[in-house]
Image (spheres, helix red, strand yellow):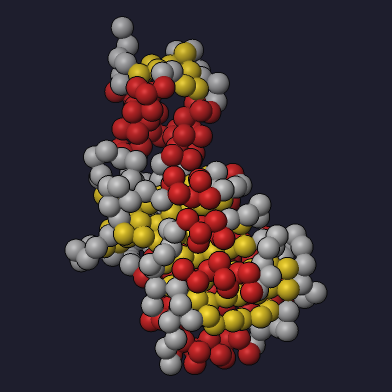
Amino acid sequence: MNEVLREVLVRHAEVWVPRVSGRGRRAVVALAYGDGESATASAEAVLGVVAEYADRLRGRQLTVLVLADATEELPARLGPVEAALPAEVAVHLVPGGPARLPVALKAAGAAGAPLLSYLDGPGATDRAVLAAAAGRSAEVLVVTEAAPDASVRPALRDAGFPLVAEVDLVPGDGSPARRLAFGTGYDRSLEAFKDLLWAVDEYAGVRYRDPADPAGRLLDIALDPEPGPLRRELLAELDRSGPRTVTELRRHALTGTVYRAADVQRALTGLLHSGAVTRDPEHGRLGGDVVIAAGPQP
């Protein structure tokens, strides 16, 4: 479980750090954990990403905040990586977990700077914490317990993240599932997050579950995920909203399910072949302006 969460965070940092390095003179990464043990490997991996792109940070300022209860291992592991970073990168260890984020960000002078937050532990979904993590150039990853009523989507939207993705990580050993949510204001960031989500280690002993799937079917991690749950979710959307264009259904998959927009084509092809949906026009390429409606062919 922790390995998959760490890989998702690292892959996203590999996209985020070089992107913001060309935007302005400063940026902030805030990593907040409920315990120091889980923080150590994760924070070390993120600092490794920062070190990899250190040459792009010359003349800019990047602040990395690590919020976790102190352990002897945490500063010992982060120290050597921090020592190799350029002077433009400042690393601060802050006692406490996600609940301390508003205070830590204010002390770091993060207002207005691009911000990437990772929140895992008690307080991660508190209104004040998510509000502090929000901003015009902010993105956030939130880890919580997975439960039918545990959606983070409304809280993230209320905090100022209009685009949200959620996925349950279900371990094969029977241990409790965790829900991972991502909030952003940029379509491209959401698309990139979905791409990396399906590219993590498929042999890590974790399967995905889409919170939007009423059947709760488990999905193997794969570059081409099984389309069954997406078919059900597209049918549910058509039942709720009536006929939709392919473009609108692609948008729904991106913003309302664990799937990517590109997965819609395969799902619709299966639905059309089974007669579960109809299309207008009836023939030709399945382009974005084709209208899809629920119901079998007359």
Rendered image quadrant of residue 171: bottom left
Q: In which quarter of the image is the N terminus?
A: bottom left
x, y percent for residue 115? 62, 62
Rendered image quadrant of residue 79: bottom right
Inspect this view and state whether residue 233 appears.
Answer: yes
Q: Observer-nearest residue: 257 or 123? A: 123
At 73% across and 73% down in the image, what residue appears? Answer: 61
Give the answer, above or below, for where 100 lies relative to 77: above
> Quick check: 111 left or right of 218?
right
Give the answer, above or below, for where 53 lies relative to 250: below
Rendered image quadrant of residue 3: bottom left
Give the answer, above or below, for where 260 lies relative to 243: below
Residue at the limit of the structure toward the top, as seen here:
298
Inspect this view and state whether residue 18 appears.
Answer: no
x, y percent for residue 34? 39, 73
At 31% across and 7% down in the image, what residue appears? Answer: 298
At 32% across and 16% down in the image, what residue appears? Answer: 295
At 35% across and 56% down in the image, what residue appears? Answer: 179
Q: Observer-nearest residue: 285 or 292? A: 292
> Quick check: 60 left or right of 128?
right
Q: Observer-nearest residue: 22 or 30? A: 30
x, y percent for residue 195? 49, 51
Give the answer, above or below, for where 240 lies relative to 126: above
x, y percent for residue 32? 48, 71
Residue at the limit of the structure toward the left, as seen here:
174
